[in-house]
Image (cartoon, helix red, strand yellow):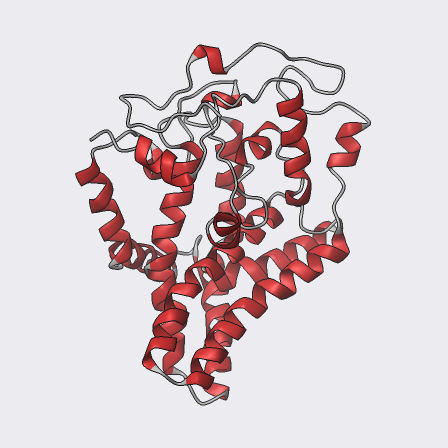
Amino acid sequence: MTAVTEPLTTVLPPPSALPDVLPTERLLASGKPVRPLRDELRRIDDLRNVGSLVLTWLQPVVTIGLAVWIGHPLAYVVAFFLMGPAYVRFAILGHEAAHRLLFTDKRLNDFIGRWFVAYPGFVPFEGYRRSHFAHHKDEFGPDEPDLNLYNGYPITSASFWRKMRRDAFGKSGWKNLKGLLMALTSKTARPFAGRIVCAQVVILAMFTAVGRPELFVLLWLLPWMTVWRVMNRLRAIAEHGGMMRSKDRRLTTHHVEQSWLARATLVPFNTGWHLAHHVDMGVPWRNLPKLHAELVAAGWVTPEYTYPSYRALWKALRSG
């Protein structure tokens, strides 16, 4: 496989990696599938998504429960770091619900998305949905809500590691937490912030009920403020870092070969097939690899465009 592996002054794919091969009988010029393939790929699997939701909650319950059962300080340290991937799963299922792709019943989708995924993960569901749709409408455009996460790459290694330290030591997390607390004083934002606080109070009550209220801070709040922030930035720059505004999604979004470790931690629920998601945001997560396979079969996604690993991409995003 030919792939970009060395630091560059730009990480934009070369023209040779972007062949003009669309439309085809199965794909539009944008890459979106045509019917009946479109209907097949947009089908939501409600029953299996219930299982995914249950497993998402089991991960933190089992992680924290085992730490308490073992009782060794090292077990608590391991649990602290494993809560990062737990928050990733909450975020990705919340993202799926924001797209109305978690359950076919829209009211159920929004209720579960709010109270069982987004609010426990400190995400203001309604505001996130609104801003995230702006992201999809025009990546890197004037209304792009996430530009501060991945604009301006490649950056120097020194700058990269400064960002990582701010995230790892809670500076970014405190900024987010302070914003949530300040929102409680705003008439317009108070209802949304209040719901997040209500969800957190319920979770605190659960810790208190088992006689360990301090673990709400140590193994719930602090991992969100630290480990999760690092993982969120690493995932965000792997999706869009160093790209540009364009109608061709190959110039706005990266694609990385998926490993089992990445899928288990950084990019669960097929998040790593992010190009396919931006090609057609109406395709639920289970079917993104199928859409990606169609894009590869059409010759639209090439080996030259693809990074062999996240490590290779993060290396390319550092200019020196």
Q: In the rendered view, tell whether residue 201 sits above or below residue 162.
A: below
Which residue occupies the foreground of this view, 35 or 310? Answer: 310
Which residue occupies the foreground of this view, 212 or 9? Answer: 9
Farthest bottom residue in view: 211
Farthest left residue in view: 158
Q: Residue at x 45, y 11 (%)?
A: 15
Horizontal side of 89 relative to 180 (left or right) equals right
Farthest front residue in view: 1
Q: Position of residue 72 (x, y in %)?
A: 36, 83
Horizontal side of 299 relative to 75 (left or right) equals right
Q: Is residue 185 visible?
A: no
Which residue occupies the foreground of this view, 267 or 6? Answer: 6
Q: Residue at x 17, y 40 (%)?
A: 158
Q: Residue at x 48, y 79 (%)?
A: 66
The part of the image, by quadrant, that contains residue 223 is bottom left
Q: Position of residue 44 (x, y in %)?
A: 74, 46
Q: In the rendered view, tell whether residue 201 sits above or below residue 139.
A: below
Q: Is residue 163 visible?
A: yes
User: What is the tally of numbered marks visible in this picture?
Assistant: 0
**Quadrant showing the C terminus:** top left
Horizontal side of 204 relative to 180 (left or right) equals right
The part of the image, by quadrant, that contains residue 174 is bottom left
Q: In the rendered view, tell whether residue 59 sits above or below residue 293.
A: below
Q: Position of residue 178 (x, y in %)?
A: 30, 59
Q: Residue at x 53, y 74 (%)?
A: 62
Q: Position of residue 59 (x, y in %)?
A: 54, 67
